[in-house]
Amino acid sequence: MSDVELIGQTLSNALPYIQRWRGRVVVVKYGGHALDGGDGGTFATDVALLHAVGVRPVVVHGGGPQISRMMERLGKTAQFVDGLRVTDAETIGIASMVLLGEVNPALVAAIGRAGAGAVGVSGQDAGLLQVVARDQRLGFVGDVHAVDPSVVRQSLDAGQVPVVATIGSDAAGQPYNVNADAAAAAIAAALAAEKLVYLTDVEGVRRHADDPTSVVSRCTPEEVRRMLEDGSADGGMIPKLESCLAAIDAGVRSVHIIDGRRSHALLVELFTESGLGTMITGSSS
Amino acid sequence: MSDVELIGQTLSNALPYIQRWRGRVVVVKYGGHALDGGDGGTFATDVALLHAVGVRPVVVHGGGPQISRMMERLGKTAQFVDGLRVTDAETIGIASMVLLGEVNPALVAAIGRAGAGAVGVSGQDAGLLQVVARDQRLGFVGDVHAVDPSVVRQSLDAGQVPVVATIGSDAAGQPYNVNADAAAAAIAAALAAEKLVYLTDVEGVRRHADDPTSVVSRCTPEEVRRMLEDGSADGGMIPKLESCLAAIDAGVRSVHIIDGRRSHALLVELFTESGLGTMITGSSS
Amino acid sequence: MSDVELIGQTLSNALPYIQRWRGRVVVVKYGGHALDGGDGGTFATDVALLHAVGVRPVVVHGGGPQISRMMERLGKTAQFVDGLRVTDAETIGIASMVLLGEVNPALVAAIGRAGAGAVGVSGQDAGLLQVVARDQRLGFVGDVHAVDPSVVRQSLDAGQVPVVATIGSDAAGQPYNVNADAAAAAIAAALAAEKLVYLTDVEGVRRHADDPTSVVSRCTPEEVRRMLEDGSADGGMIPKLESCLAAIDAGVRSVHIIDGRRSHALLVELFTESGLGTMITGSSS
Amino acid sequence: MSDVELIGQTLSNALPYIQRWRGRVVVVKYGGHALDGGDGGTFATDVALLHAVGVRPVVVHGGGPQISRMMERLGKTAQFVDGLRVTDAETIGIASMVLLGEVNPALVAAIGRAGAGAVGVSGQDAGLLQVVARDQRLGFVGDVHAVDPSVVRQSLDAGQVPVVATIGSDAAGQPYNVNADAAAAAIAAALAAEKLVYLTDVEGVRRHADDPTSVVSRCTPEEVRRMLEDGSADGGMIPKLESCLAAIDAGVRSVHIIDGRRSHALLVELFTESGLGTMITGSSS
Amino acid sequence: MSDVELIGQTLSNALPYIQRWRGRVVVVKYGGHALDGGDGGTFATDVALLHAVGVRPVVVHGGGPQISRMMERLGKTAQFVDGLRVTDAETIGIASMVLLGEVNPALVAAIGRAGAGAVGVSGQDAGLLQVVARDQRLGFVGDVHAVDPSVVRQSLDAGQVPVVATIGSDAAGQPYNVNADAAAAAIAAALAAEKLVYLTDVEGVRRHADDPTSVVSRCTPEEVRRMLEDGSADGGMIPKLESCLAAIDAGVRSVHIIDGRRSHALLVELFTESGLGTMITGSSS
Amino acid sequence: MSDVELIGQTLSNALPYIQRWRGRVVVVKYGGHALDGGDGGTFATDVALLHAVGVRPVVVHGGGPQISRMMERLGKTAQFVDGLRVTDAETIGIASMVLLGEVNPALVAAIGRAGAGAVGVSGQDAGLLQVVARDQRLGFVGDVHAVDPSVVRQSLDAGQVPVVATIGSDAAGQPYNVNADAAAAAIAAALAAEKLVYLTDVEGVRRHADDPTSVVSRCTPEEVRRMLEDGSADGGMIPKLESCLAAIDAGVRSVHIIDGRRSHALLVELFTESGLGTMITGSSS
């Protein structure tokens, strides 16, 4: 096959996938680690390609490493309660600054440079992420109890890519830090998204936590539940898997956990037969 | 580069082209010769991919060889005036049957199988191709004098691929045969199309008619005019080049003459840097 | 009464009917026999008048006699299985050519000349008539198993008169011949039409098949069922009556079987107190 | 021709007129005299028929005789200045009551009974008829100086027949009596109406005021101007003719002066070749 | 507090009420007594302010005193049946003239002068108030049996203030006089209004008919029912209270009976904490 | 006057202003100083009241003092070129964090608590503030050269209050700090705003810089130009006055410079006759 024939063939092979995901909402959780370099450079163009072929991507991000770095620079010492980090007033202020003022605009700018109009969105905007405090002793750490996705829909309807920073607020307007994995699942559920994709720094879900060759490419919510129950899930993966199950239960059609360190991971996962990493699919899809 | 990386890269390379042509109307003239086999099999999937990524393709077709074949089967002998074939009442009846009842539904079905809703359109529908007789002695051979593209727009707005058979009608509703190259140019002009693509059985426009190595990849309307004036244009190419100029003059941004016998010719032309065949571009684009 | 007073009175008498049918969909099955001459000349202007006063007519046609004639011209001998005509690949090709390329454009042109924008539609367009083979031995004879009326709605919403040729297709895009009476009933049902009118070459439904004076002007679905069961229905009328029942059961408000050989039969049926032929009305209307 | 054939033929003959006036605004001035009996009984059904076939009628009416009658009942003696009747505060009150409370609802009810939703509109509603006093000595007699037709458009867009009583108001909200012929012309101009029809109690415009056989069936604005200048116009017709010219100059396509005492005068004028009375047509139509 | 601070504070205090009633329909019944003078002068500006801050007011009015006055002027003697006034043909004619031709345009003009586009509406327009005769012996006194609020909605959607005169009509188009309190309740119900406000000439509902200090500021439908049953309701208030209950039962959120003789009664009732008069609130609000 | 009458009167007095500004865009520049306390507490409720009565407020803010404070905390020493502060990569990062992550969400939360849905917007979103570097030596200090207000319009059309942080970006997506006074003027111009209001910490524009009693309540652009030319303008006021002129020249109807330290300054300025501070009005308004 000549070069141009190969190109034609590759594009043509993507046809059924493009037709299938066209017009559908795909929520992509992009991790703070990914932001720090590596092959993350293809993320913004991948999002722009999804957008260009008619998929409706929503980017959700946290920024843990960046927040820690800024706290250190400001000489802020972390406090702990029962081993959990406390988010006091100063810390939530720093988190807000870093997420909304550093990480979010960097992503908006990168996606914009790739040719897709992107818009920064805070979880505090127009009731997007409404939270309650998880535990008074932890301070301003919030659990999502309601989502008003209208500000995100508005961007989607205007043909833009919304990029959401996961600061929520309570009924009094007080800002809270929200776990980005859980926030992404809640937003995907509220949008009745087709897919929720976690870009992580692992290759996928391992059937056995300590066996790197046991990555599964497809599994059911029942299998995930079993892994969580019988202790075979990796410790760091547990909250992510719980978010996956919540999203599937709320009607998201499939959740993908893939290796964000790979080039064009997002495109390969969505537009090829083989895909990458692990896909968890609800029974009805 | 691994295989999946190559796929990711290929899709990613197409991004700027997809962004550029998104939402734009591209009129594709598909020749009757192409319908008879060869590698034409990728045409329908190529059209479906354009459609899937948000381009708005309009297919225009003739069917000369198929009409000749049916005339032969019906024992109809061609008549000539000054060396030109006469389209008498029986001939236009046969042309109508073949184009509307054989060629058009075959294309509609093929594009439908590739996943894009296609709709057959006759030039007689709702004033699409309004013609006047070219020369009384030639019978029902018509020149387009007005186009009402609303029935085509209606299909585009409904997200369908209109497939146009080039039978026009005069003010009294009498059907006429219309040259498909000219009809495609007129429709492209009426739709203010971004592109008009001629899928032919040659490699492109030759600077010198008898030098197969002189295919030009890009030229201006002025150069085309010069070729027509100084006699360097190939005889069979002359009417097509005149249609190209008419389309460019009426505001179509570029006209492409490419080799429809190549696999995925349409995709390669629109979505790669190098392209295929010859592109004629108006001065302002 | 002076002449102009008579005219004023006639128009005024039509007022309640115009008000009643305004905006409603009326599917008219026009037979191939009617196309061959006689007083059929008023059909197109009648359709245009319906359209002009705000009724939304949909024309559905077959073309049996025209297909037979073309088969004869092409020296094609009919084959039979258990006494039923077989539609082999060549025959469906001929039927397609005749219906889409001869009968349909003739009707589109005639209605257009009467001043109503008409658009030819094939049952193959965008899934309009989705069929399954009736019996493998009969070849490409299809029964409608699903209707996607969106391409017809699109024309209606654009203020046009859709003219439907009854070639359907199966899931693989293979064309099939479909009985036009059944197709008209299926389309009327899918559009939730107010009325389905069969223009035939008889005066109406006879209570007793061989008594020409027994034409009934109004009957219920129950009476029709009884005629079919007790054998009093005329043999040629049986499939038409079955289509009527199917349409009524699917929600069409009334079905009319009238004599298409009468001048302005359609207008008289819809816009006068007395009407023509037979009207079958569902219980709730 | 049989009876039903005659009916069919009559309806069919109206087709080109229905197609031509469909969707167009026709302002009909209905005189107070007409309201008092005679054959006026067909007016409401005629308006309903126009409405039913898609014309957009607007009815404008005065009510001179009814006002005079009520003034007499209330023992109100008319006052005059230079031979012109003075409209003092009491008189405008009576005119308002009679037009808005007697004539207008009677017309609304009659058109409603004929099956067309009608809505009463006062010239005072939302700035419809904005007037200035003609002459302080005449009291509340106003000349239209601006028209805001939005309240009328609103009814038309809702598919209703607006029925306008010609009481206007000045900038301070004070009501004024407005000549209904002039008001109808001003409203027709503001709506860019296709036609303005005056239903009167004469047969049309006479070329020579005192020759009843000299009624002209068609004339140009220039001819009307000449009649006004050379004194051949009938005294009572002069203000009406001036309103006609104003309407034509403001873009109304044609003005008709017809005999409202004839049955179905409106239908005959609009839907037959011959028409009734006099039509004045601008040069460009 | 300085003067400007006081003004700022007053406006600011109204904020929660403006936010709460914004976009809601408020039907205001304005009595004929109120029209005769007193402090009624602030009514039109109050309505205009409601309109300006985004509330959607609908004004409903009767005009008993004005009708009586006109009957007297016309020398018309009232007739009675069982002590109830008979509305014969002449009386309904007078009522129509007075309500539609005197009271209604006066209110439309006043609200217009206050800067809100107002439109007069008759209960006869497009089926707004459909009535049946209450008792043949009473003549044209009608009870509302159906409401088609579309003509009112149309005005609201066009940003206007509809002002409704309570003349209804029966199926034959015959006009009837309708009690304005009952009509206001029926219209409020049909519009699913937020509030129905009766502007009266008393201070509110008294718990004990003859104790002026017993005005209640808030009560439930149950309490109203009890007052009606145990005879503690004031005679003149009984029909009004029955209308209140009908409106609440039909889904209106609250009904207010306030003293229309107070300056800016409407504003104070809607935009302050304390309010005026009596509010009856359904259990679910 | 009783208390409730006073309230009624105050609201009623605001009517003409509410009617005048309804539906109009008012851009309010809120200064960083104002955010630091004082009577600034009424700002958010004032914005919510504007929003509630149908004005369309857009809030634009900087945050100089907050940025300086954070730089100090991070031990960042300011650098200067020709006496102007240099914004190096680290500084723009800090400015971004403070404006987007601290000041902006605080305002969004406050307005939300006052009952108006507010949405944070960055000048980097979807091309809102497109800048060029002012002077390479100053680093990332940008001048607005183009505004794409669609992201702001989108919020306004969704009924929200957009709150804009004035970080812009250049063609490569690099963020720049933009003077908030100039940004507010550019946004007001792009939105064709009715008004641009500067909430400052002075009482208004003084005719003579050092005479506190010389505050002018109204002046023309010509007078402002003269003050700038003859040196009578206060040094700190000069850039603000230049922004005012730019806005007026670009079509903003009036610019207001008022004392943000006063309670309800915004309401008093917009909704009372006297107003506060200085209004500069273009000649045509």
Image: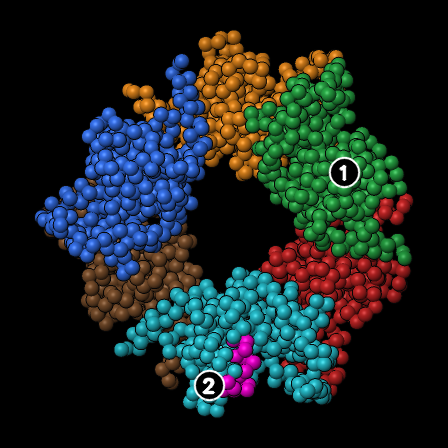
Chain colours: A red, B green, C orange, D blue, E brown, F cyan
Nearest to the observer: residue D278 or residue C110: D278
Q: Label 1, secondary structure: give it.
A: helix
Q: Is residue A142 magenta?
A: no
Q: Which amino acid, mark 1?
A: Leu
Crowd band around label 1 with a 10 angstrom C-alpha radius: few (<14), some (14–19), many (20+) = some
Coordinates of residue C82 in the picture (x, y in percent): 72, 13
Q: What range of the chain is rendered magenta?
A: F230-244
Coordinates of residue A251 in the picture (x, y in percent): 67, 54
Q: Residue at x 71, y 19 (%)?
A: B81
Residue E161: mark in rendering: none
| Front disc: 2 or 1 | 1
* Disc 2 target residue: F206
Q: Label 2, secondary structure: give it.
A: loop
* Disc 1 target residue: B228
Separation (CA) of disc 2 from disc 1: 75 Å
Q: Which amino acid, mark 2?
A: Arg
